[in-house]
């Protein structure tokens, strides 16, 4: 049988011409079959009589290899200028379109499943790309931008939302890929009008790939720059001196934002009478913790023994982060570690210099970001900021503070403790644990220089241990008004 359009020989049961794509109807199969037999007979006659006017190379009217006659190639291949060129038939889509036309179910298209938007553009099915894939691609870019913003601003809520939305987009993308694989052939048959001479648009695929590469590169550069800024904060950095803060108050420099300065001045003024002593600037930590993060997560300040310093910062600050540094000199023995803790409050940005070692913790410095640099605060100002942060976190006062004052037993024995002395002798806070406080008297050797205290319902219990760990001087005191 021969195609009625291009004249090429095709199979008897062919529904589409593999050379030009013409649909072959049932009646056309019968006509082309008989016409093919007549054509074959004429070809045989002319081959036997080369001199007749109907052979190859004859004048117009016969079958020749000149333009207008039947050629040995599909229409458009090797055509002369001015002739209409056609695309070759895609045998896969010829079979699929033929089956769909006969009412058979569409087969799963694996290329459409795996390649998705690239496959849709390559096959010229722009409507499917715009409907299924362009919104998904734009939402993915928006999600990555939101993730970048959350990292830059250290916004955990936004970061979590962006992460969850990214997971949802991934699951939606899988569902879209499955749907596209199932329905693409049906949709493409309708788009092409059943013509298996389908398009190939490699240029569109190249443009999409270039756009994705450019967007991915821009996002990667953004992630890199933000990561560097977080690890090495160039705008909020300083060279820590780790000098113990002076006791005399210093005048703050004029900040860049007058609104932030006013808020900070109001905050400091509200705590102007707070004592600047070791109660707020010292503490303790796990002496056996060697890992940086584990050590920091075990820090308590003497302001409160019921809440960790890291939990206080999380509850009171908008956001905070830390880094370890190497000081010029060591303040503690026993594997010391030194931290810079950056905190953001409504009133401004603060950095604390913290030293740890041998179970001891010391706030060595406190700095306020003022426009273009960090400005050092004195001890009273640092104590005021820490007190405000602890109050925002809802942390209760420690026994080290509540035990201050004058106390007396029922027998008239007095116990007087202030921020510096116990019964007139200088002391140092040691540690607090399970509601108990341990202090030791300075320049006193032996067990008699250590005091253990507990406060329960307004009654202060003070005792000591002898050399054999027996409790001595176990007395109970009531507060003297």
Image: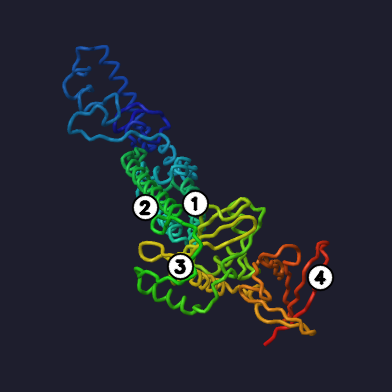
Which mark is on residue 328? Answer: 1
- Residue at 52% from the left image edge and 62% from the top image edge: 364
Q: Nearer the N terminus, badge 2 or badge 1?
A: 2
In percent of width and height, residue 205 lies at: 35, 42
Estimate the spatial distance between the alpha carbons at disc 3 and disc 1, rounded to whole Å.
20 Å
| In the image: residue 70, left or right of residue 383 | left
Estimate the spatial distance between the alpha carbons at disc 4 and disc 2, rounded to whole Å.
85 Å
Location of residue 375 by image quarter: bottom left
**Element class at badge 3:** loop
| Camera sees residue 192 | no
Q: Residues within 10 Å of mark 4 (few under 14, many from 20)?
A: few
**Element class at badge 1:** loop
| Residue 195 in the image: above or below residue 238 | above
Q: Residues within 10 Å of mark 2 (few under 14, many from 20)?
A: some
In percent of width and height, residue 316 lies at: 53, 70
Query: Which residue is labeled 4 in the image?
Result: 472
| Residue 200 in the image: above or below residue 293 | above
> Going by the picture, which residue comes out furthest to the left?
59
Q: Nearer the N terminus, badge 4 or badge 3?
A: 3
Of the residues tagged 3 and 1, which is closer to the observer?
1
Q: Nearer the N terminus, badge 4 or badge 1?
A: 1
- Position of the C terminus, as image quadrant, is bottom right
Q: Residues within 10 Å of mark 1 (few under 14, many from 20)?
A: few
Q: Camera-side residue: 469 or 68?
A: 469
Query: Which residue is labeled 2 in the image?
Result: 130
Query: Which residue is labeled 3 in the image?
Result: 377
Q: Nearer the N terminus, badge 3 or badge 2?
A: 2
Q: Nearer the N terminus, badge 3 or badge 1?
A: 1
Estimate the spatial distance between the alpha carbons at disc 2 and disc 1, rounded to whole Å.
61 Å
């Amino acid at each position: 049988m021969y195609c009625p359009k291009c004249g090429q020989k095709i199979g008897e049961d062919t529904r589409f011409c593999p050379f030009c794509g013409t649909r072959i109807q049932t009646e056309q199969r019968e006509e082309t079959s008989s016409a093919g037999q007549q054509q074959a007979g004429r070809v045989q006659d002319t081959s036997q009589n080369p001199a007749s006017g109907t052979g190859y190379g004859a004048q117009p009217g016969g079958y020749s290899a000149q333009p207008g006659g039947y050629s040995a190639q599909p229409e458009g291949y090797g055509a002369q200028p001015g002739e209409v060129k056609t695309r070759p038939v895609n045998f896969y889509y010829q079979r699929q379109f033929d089956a769909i036309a006969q009412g058979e179910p569409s087969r799963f298209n694996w290329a459409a499943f795996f390649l998705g938007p690239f496959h849709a553009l390559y096959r010229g099915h722009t409507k499917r790309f715009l409907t299924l894939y362009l919104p998904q691609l734009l939402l993915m870019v928006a999600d990555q931008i939101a993730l970048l913003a959350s990292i830059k601003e250290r916004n955990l809520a936004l970061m979590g939302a962006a992460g969850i939305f990214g997971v949802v987009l991934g699951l939606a993308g899988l569902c879209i890929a499955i749907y596209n694989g199932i329905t693409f052939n049906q949709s493409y048959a309708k788009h092409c009008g059943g013509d298996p001479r389908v398009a190939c648009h490699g240029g569109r695929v190249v443009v999409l790939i270039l756009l994705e590469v450019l967007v991915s590169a821009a996002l990667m550069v953004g992630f890199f720059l933000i990561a560097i800024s977080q690890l090495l904060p160039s705008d909020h950095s300083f060279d820590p001196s780790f000098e113990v803060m002076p006791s005399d108050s210093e005048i703050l420099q004029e900040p860049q934002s007058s609104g932030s300065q006013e808020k900070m001045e109001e905050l400091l003024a509200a705590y102007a009478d707070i004592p600047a002593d070791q109660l707020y600037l010292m503490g303790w930590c796990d002496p056996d913790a060697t890992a940086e993060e584990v050590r920091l997560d075990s820090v308590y300040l003497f302001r409160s023994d019921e809440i960790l310093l890291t939990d206080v910062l999380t509850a009171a600050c908008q956001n905070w982060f830390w880094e370890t540094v190497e000081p010029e000199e060591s303040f503690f023995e026993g594997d010391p570690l030194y931290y810079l803790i950056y905190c953001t409050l409504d009133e401004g940005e603060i950095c604390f210099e913290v030293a740890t070692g041998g179970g001891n913790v010391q706030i060595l410095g406190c700095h306020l970001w003022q426009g273009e640099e960090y400005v050092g605060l004195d001890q009273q100002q640092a104590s005021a900021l820490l007190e405000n942060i602890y109050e925002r976190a809802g942390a209760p006062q420690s026994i080290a503070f509540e035990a201050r004052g004058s106390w007396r037993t029922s027998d008239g024995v007095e116990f007087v403790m202030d921020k510096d002395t116990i019964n007139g002798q200088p002391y140092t806070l040691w540690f607090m644990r399970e509601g108990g406080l341990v202090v030791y008297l300075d320049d006193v050797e032996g067990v008699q220089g250590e005091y253990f205290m507990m406060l329960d319902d307004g009654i202060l219990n003070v005792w000591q241990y002898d050399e054999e760990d027996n409790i001595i001087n176990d007395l109970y005191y009531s507060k003297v008004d």
